[in-house]
Image (tube, rainbow, N blue to C red):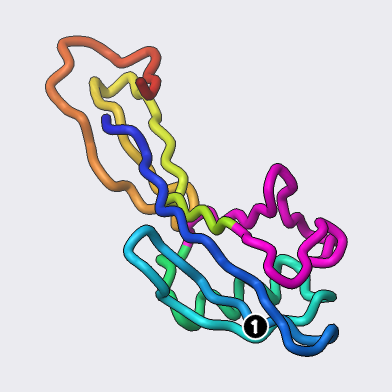
Amino acid sequence: LGKACSLCFSLVLCSMEPCVLHVKVLSFAGEVAGLTAKPSWGLSEVLAAVQMQLNIAPGACVQVFHGMSQLLAGTSLADIGVAEGSQLTLVVSPSPRCVAASRNRTAKLWDSASGECLHILEGHEDGVTSAAFS
């Protein structure tokens, strides 16, 4: 099974007035979105605004960082030191996966967010007693 990959974006924050931040979302290829955010915005507000413009897949794991500080639930952009000219990094990883072993000589790959079985690994000579990602 392959390793999960991540998409990384940078958000550059600047403002003309202290109560509003104009946010540019950047990828390695250039600007992909622009937002107007308040310093009081938390994770849910930032993600909702980004989701509207970037079409992030449902169930994807999305994290927002400012330097070494992560924007977590219950914190705001101001709490993690975001100010005019700051840069944020948005990391988007595919929906989490899990694998299950079975005595029926199969292993199954599941999408943890949706509960959907993505693939059945068949052909084992005996029951599968363990499975792991590498």
For residue 27, say whether it is visible.
yes
Classified by dominant secondary structure, the portion drawn in magenta counts as loop
Near-viewer residue (62 or 86): 86
- Against 110, residue 101 (above or below) is above
Q: What residue type is labelled 1?
A: His
Quadrant holding the C terminus: top left
- Against 92, residue 2 (above or below) is above
Residue 3: image x %, image y %?
Answer: 34, 33
Identify the residue under disc 1.
22
- Against 125, residue 134 (above or below) is below
Q: Measuring 45% from the left and 50% from the top, which residue is drawn there?
A: 93
Instruction: Give the quarter of the image for residue 120.
Output: top left
Residue 81: image x %, image y %?
Answer: 82, 58
Q: Is residue 30 left or right of residue 37?
A: left
Q: In this view, does 129 lie to the left or right of 78?
A: left
Near-viewer residue (50 or 4): 50
Q: Is residue 122 left or right of residue 27?
A: left
Near-viewer residue (108 or 32): 32
Near-viewer residue (93 or 84): 84
Q: Does the magenta stretch include residue 76?
A: yes
Q: Measuring 15% from the left and 11% from the top, which residue is drawn there?
A: 125
- Against 15, residue 127 (above or below) is above
Q: Does the magenta stretch include residue 124?
A: no
Stretch of the chain drawn in magenta: 59-88
Element assignment for label 1: strand
Q: Measuring 60% from the left and 54% from the top, which residue is drawn there?
A: 63
Q: Residue furthest left?
A: 123
Residue 94: image x %, image y %?
Answer: 41, 51
Residue 122: image x %, image y %?
Answer: 16, 27
Q: Is residue 122 left or right of residue 31?
A: left
